[in-house]
Image (cartoon, rainbow, N blue to C red):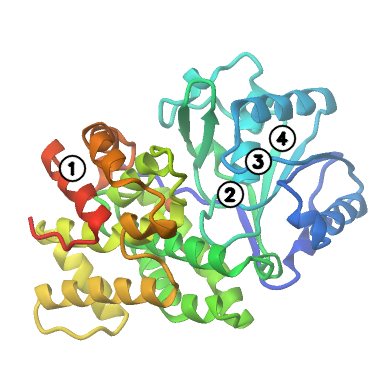
Amino acid sequence: MARFTLPRDLYHGKGSLEELKNLTGSKAIVVVGGGSMKRFGFLDRAVSYLKEAGMDVQLFENVEPDPSVETVMKGAKMMQEFGPDWIVAMGGGSPIDAAKAMWAFYEYPETTFEDLITPFSFPTLRTKARFCAIPSTSGTATEVTAFSVITDYNKGIKYPLADFNITPDVAIVDPDLAETMPKKLTAHTGMDAMTHAIEAYVSTLHCDYTDPLALHAIKMIHNDLKKSYDGDMDARDRMHNAQCLAGMAFSNALLGIVHSMAHKTGAAYSGGHIVHGCANAMYLPGVIQYNAKNEEAALRYAEIADFIGLDGASTEEKVAALVAEIKAMNDMLDIPKCIKDYEGGIIDEKEFMDKLPAVAELAIGDACTGSNPRIPTQDEMEKLLKACYYGEDINF
Ligand code: FE
């Protein structure tokens, strides 16, 4: 038995934000990030649509990137006092992720993060509120997924929450919001979405329901990401849908070790964070080479290559063509080839090598490793990470 879960309603297309007018309820809390939604006028519009729907509205503003346990608890407390029957989360991945966790603590004030981190063990939500998610970036697709990541800065731990209870009820995928993204964010979030779709397609949990979503997302991202990066707003609009399709696929098929490696290298080094989408983009070619030693995975990568019209007579040639194509996309998007070149070399070589065994062990233990087509040994994971540091091809 397997389960496939998506939001009940998904509104998409330019101007779809207006659908907030048609939510039925009496009180809504709007959870937003640091200010771009306010600056561009989307927050005001959302609030006035909700008021038009006859609701009292409160705001929870300034959710930080990589939202903290404290922010989640503050928001949950505000919800307990206000008693909303709609939680409307708007912005990049962070405010939506934070609001998902707030939702759980609003409905179950006595629960703890430790209770929630066991995957798919959430208590039943929707006893107090329903959830509407409105993304402003085109990458995480948290508006349609069962996932949220919350950081405990005191303990230095990231809590990856996973449960279909936190899959939103309503997603509003309005491309007007994504048109505000700066260029670099467009590249990084776009390659994050590409990684979601490719990892979902080769995941051991992929199925007939996730495959078409993943393949179509890959084709769209392949066609439109570069154009979107260059400022073509029609392509930007299509990318907003493409990332959402990728999200529908990976929320149900899960991911693989590109994400395991990105999660564990992201905040491991003193020189600075390696941005999630950029890390995925850099690691994806090598991981494809590694996974393709698994015959079944190789066939699926070859299917992807066929689907996007790459050349190649044999499975091997098609896999190589896909790897080359991802590298070419990265080049066009000004994404560095390897960790060594990241942001002018901020990740120190010696520190990287010193931490290699520990980071590799953590990456193997990451929640995304279990659905990867090949499970790496400690030695293999260290070699993979090292190859990603220097930008070398993988042939083991
Ligand atoms: Fe991701």
**Which residue was labeled with disc 2?**
93
Which residue is labeled 3 in the image? Answer: 64
Residue 129 circle label: 4
The image quadrant of residue 395 is: bottom left
Vertical side of 56 occupied by 118: above or below: above
Tell me: 89 left or right of 246.
right
Distance of mark 4 from mark 1, alpha carbons? Answer: 45 Å
Q: Specify which label sits upstream in the sequence, 2 or 3.
A: 3
How far separated are the C-alphas under marks 2 and 3? 10 Å
Residue depth check, mark 2 versus mark 4: number of the one nearer the observer:
2
Question: What secondary structure is marked by label 1?
Answer: helix
Whether ligand 1 has any atom under 8 Å from the Cβ at mark 3 is answered as no
Label 1 vs 2, first from the N-terminus:
2
C-alpha span from label 3 to label 4: 23 Å
The answer to whether the residue labelled 2 contacts the one labelled 4, judged by CB atoms less than 8 Å apart, is no
Disc 2 crowd, CA 10 A, few/some/many (<14, 14-19, 20+): many
Q: Nearer the viewer, residue 369 or 245?
A: 369
Relative to 21, does residue 58 appear above or below in the rendering? above
Where residue 186 appears, as percent x and y from the top left, is 55, 67
Task: Pick whichever, 10 or 179, lies toward us.
Answer: 179
